[in-house]
Amino acid sequence: MALHIPKAPGVPQMLKEGARMFSGLEEAVYRNINACKQFAQSVRSAYGPNGMNKMIINHIEKQFVTSDAGTIIRELDVEHPAAKLMVLASQMQDSEVGDGTNFVIVISGALLEAAEELLRLGVTTSEIAEGYEKAMDKCLEILPELVNYEIKDCKNFDEVVKGIKPSIMAKQYGNEDFIAGLVAKACIAILPEKTTFNVDNVRICKILGAGLLQSEVLSGMVFKREVEGEVSNATKAKVAVYSCPVDITQTETKGTVLIKSADELLNFSKGEESLLEKQIKDIADAGVKVIVAGAKFGDMALHFLNKYGVMAVRLNSKFDLRRLARTVNATVLPRLTTPTAEELGYCDVVRVDEVGDTRVVVFSMETSESRIATVVIRGSTDNYMDDIERAIDDGVNTFKGIARDGRFLPGAGATEIELAQRLLQYADTLPGLEQYAVRKFAVALESVPRALADNSGANATEVVNNIYKAHRNNEKNVGFDIDTENNGVCDATEKGVLDLYVLKYWGLKYAVGAATTILKVDQIIMAKRAGGPKPKAPAGSDDES
């Protein structure tokens, strides 16, 4: 008979065999804080214009070389439950603002690091969390006072470039003027009058070869595909969009046809042919010059399309098909029928172009206002173009933020130091133990200019002291100057280093939310994984019985 070993009393007794449980300060809280500190440390070195790149090879062996925190954390596939909370906060920031993912991780990591020191001094987690939340409320109260620039007209090209440039500078330092110009041109071209700006309407097409400065913006869509038939150009074209194959229609039920003579065989195939020809002739008679389909074009259909001079384009992605339908203002038809005037789309020019040595199909809207713009990126390697794409994506999201709320705060660590200075004054007015947490919150805010200084090779302590010194003289827009050799500071407004108000607002909210949630965890219970390794049998047990 197997030897029965009793489990320890308490929660472990209730759980399945193989489950693990950690509780208390030492086992749970410090453990979580350490994991989050390590995670924040690794991402922190990628912060700012001089941030280092990370090389990540994900689970499907795809290689990424980037300093974009959003991509880094998405591809890392973090397992630790506490670090996962930071990742979730960062992803929320990405979906809300589209930029500032690294800011959330740097701040929440610094808050947890500061909390560890307070915990070792004997302050309880609830008091720290309460102090942090009070400090955050105070920060959000102060933020509107620090606004130093506002864009009121989203169609003013120069102002938009000024607003977009800093977010691109963080990813592509040196090319920010050119890329900001591309993004501003693409966004302003498709900004709707009544509805809100949709990020998805700025498409990106990456074509290998040439250099970044050969990139351009086209109103309309560009696809890396060849046309199916012989017709490769159409102007002022009516466009029909189908989600079905353009081919002889298959019958819905199976049937058997008995053919007794050669004439019957000829007539049978002729009937199919004439039916298909009639369908395509009717479509061509409706004035259609371009047919776009989401599935294959049959050989017979192509023959008739060439005969009636109709251009044939195939798109494999149903999302691309929908976007194109939105661009040309057409309705996607599920069956090969003759479209009505309302279902037809219109495009000024549909042509096959050669960019470098890549053949592309361009749907270009030259006179009418386009709903979609495409940025054609040129570059020498795929990795480089991917990084440019991420920079453009941040720029487009910044434009979305400007369209929603055009207020800006000074960047370069100026906002954080001003908030820290005000919080230290606020902490002196608090009677309880949470004043220590508020002070630590102010210290945690210093981690942003510190990260900028460290990544630029400057002395972080001296930089922070210089910024504090300027802020005490009521120069609240002064931040770290990454271009100086001697730990210098500059006026962020004059230098054009601006951060979106919504970015800071939501970034602080999510960072504090993640940090307080992690602090309030006092037990970690990990159930045994299904299909995981079986627990080893204790010594002395008899398996055969």
Image: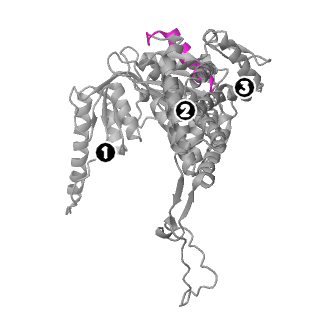
**Residue tagged 1:** 247
Sequence order check: which comes first, mark 2 or mark 1?
1
376 relative position to 238: left or right:
right
Q: Residue at x 61, y 38 (%)?
A: 109
Amino acid type, callout 3: Ala
Mark 3, Cα crowd under 10 Å, few <14 / some 14-19 / many 20+, is many
Alpha-carbon distance for marks 3 and 2? 34 Å
In which quadrant of the rendered view does residue 236 lie?
A: top left
Q: Is residue 476 left or right of residue 312?
A: right
In front of the other: label 3 or label 2?
2
Magenta stretch encompasses residue 153: yes
Q: Residue at x 50, y 66 (%)?
A: 10
Label 2 sits on what residue type?
Gly
Predominant SS along the magenta part: helix
Q: Residues within 10 Å of mark 2 (few under 14, many from 20)?
A: few
Q: Which disc, if any, is residue 432?
A: 2
Q: Which residue is mark 3?
A: 453
Q: What is the magenta range?
A: 152-171
